[in-house]
Amino acid sequence: MTKPEKTLVISPIQRGTVIDHITPGEGLTVINILGITRGTGVTVTVACNVESSRGGRKDLVKIADRELLKEEVDKIALVAPDATISIIRDYRVVDKKTVSVPQEIVGVITCPNPNCITNTKEPVPTRFAAQTRGFRCRYCDTVISLDKDIGNYI
Amino acid sequence: MTVNQRNILSVRDMDREEIDRLLSAAAEFDHGKGTGHELDGKILAVLFFEPSTRTRMSFSSAMMRLGGKILNLGSVEATSIAKGETLSDTIRVVSGYADAIVLRHPKEGAARLASEVASVPVINGGDGAGQHPSQTLLDLYTIRESMPLRNIDIGLQGDLRYGRTVHSLAFALSKYDNIRIHSIAPEGLDFPSSLKADLSELGVELICHDTIEECLPELDVLYVTRLQRERFPDPVAFDNYASTYRITPELLEAAKPNMIVLHPLPRVDEIDPRVDTLPCAKYFDQAHNGVPVRMAMLNEVMKQ
Ligand SMILES: Nc1ncnc2c1ncn2[C@@H]1O[C@H](COP(=O)(O)OP(=O)(O)OP(=O)(O)O)[C@@H](O)[C@H]1O
Ligand SMILES: [Mg+2]
Ligand SMILES: [Zn+2]
């Protein structure tokens, strides 16, 4: 087995996914965005505010026995643009990717327009398009401009 | 949404060719070139979740003039919606009853959502403060009856902040060449900054004025909208504004001879009734144009 980081605060996994270099404070949001909290039977470990080898602090999420696809994870770039996704097999990192904000963000952002159809009991996920000026609601055209903290809408 | 399902949800989705095609089709119907049997045997479901007599009646009239039939939602209180059914479920069910759906709904984005769950075409008949494409198309159609859709100075007057008709119209005009938009709005009721940013991104020239006198002599079109008392900070501010911004025959003496005056109606006091008989008054024509324009829309989504 490869020796994981010296400062590894959580136990090694045999198989799964590690999301590292999450902006401090966003670890739980990342789990929420991924929707792997309740009723999924997946073992998830979060480490918050740990020291980063790159300097400063970070949050880190470890998901056992599940290999997340890049498309699944990309939406966390909204709150953790510097995150890395490492796929672990046989205790080794076999693949590592960065994240980038997808063209369309599904089911993550809550539309700030109280009169938007997505803020009713209709069974639809929100859909926002990433555009130059910000994130635009597919349904009501409301734009959350880039100068706003998108984390407030998640 | 099924493949090739034709919806008309927002002018944002439409390119200039599509708009021009609809306007030309509307002109054909307007000039009596339709057969009256284009939509024989077709059924249009008219789902209005908020009152709007004109839009509902003109869609119904348009459908009948094409030979089709109407299925009305009836009053919301008497339906399963009152029992808490979601819009998505209503639309899925109604899809089985009709060949197309016209939806008017108080929530923004309702029509787009409906189009995603419907198995028949959906036309947006107005969603909350959002889009109202048939109004925009009939506005364009009315302008086009008087002048080509290029090199136009258009004045938009009234509540430009909450007035969805002027937002959509500004968007639609942005698709045409050499359009200058002059906004004349009371303080606090100017275009939302996001819309200004959108328009400038689209290359539209937008000039803001405090008074109509500043730009009236340049205008080819004056589009007046209703002012709503409740949008003003206090009644005095409303009365002041309403009296200074009234369109009268005297004021119009400063306008170009071919300028036209439009209003989506109903009007309150924004236009003096004495203007009605002047040749520039096109707002009743505009209302009548709702029928051929909606005929073109219905035919577009339901024709074979
Ligand atoms: N078997 C394992 N179980 C749990 N976590 C692991 C395992 N192997 C690696 N990791 C963690 O996965 C992440 C990526 O591993 P890697 O060995 O590439 O780290 P690194 O060299 O520090 O890279 P980086 O520059 O991305 O921090 C690190 O956070 C590491 O602690
Ligand atoms: Mg490291
Ligand atoms: Zn929205």
Image (tube, rainbow, N blue to C red):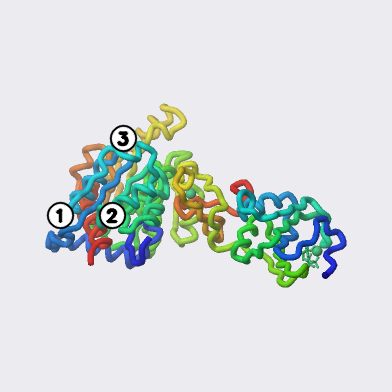
Q: Amino acid at mark 3?
A: Glu
Residue B25: x %, y % from top left: 22, 63
**From the viewer's perspective, is the residue at label 2 or at label 1 nearer?**
2
Q: Secondary structure at mark 2?
A: loop
Residue picked out by circle 2 = B96
Label 3 neighbourhood size at 10 Å, few (<14), some (14-19), many (20+)? few
**Image position of A14 (left or right of B222):** right
Of A4 and B250, nearer the camera is A4
Residue A148: x %, y % from top left: 61, 49
Q: Amino acid at mark 2?
A: Gly
Residue B67: x %, y % from top left: 14, 56
Residue picked out by circle 3 = B77
Q: CA distance from mark 1 to mark 3?
A: 30 Å
Residue picked out by circle 1 = B65
Disc 1 residue: CB within 8 Å of ligand 3: no
**Image position of B38 (left or right of B110):** left
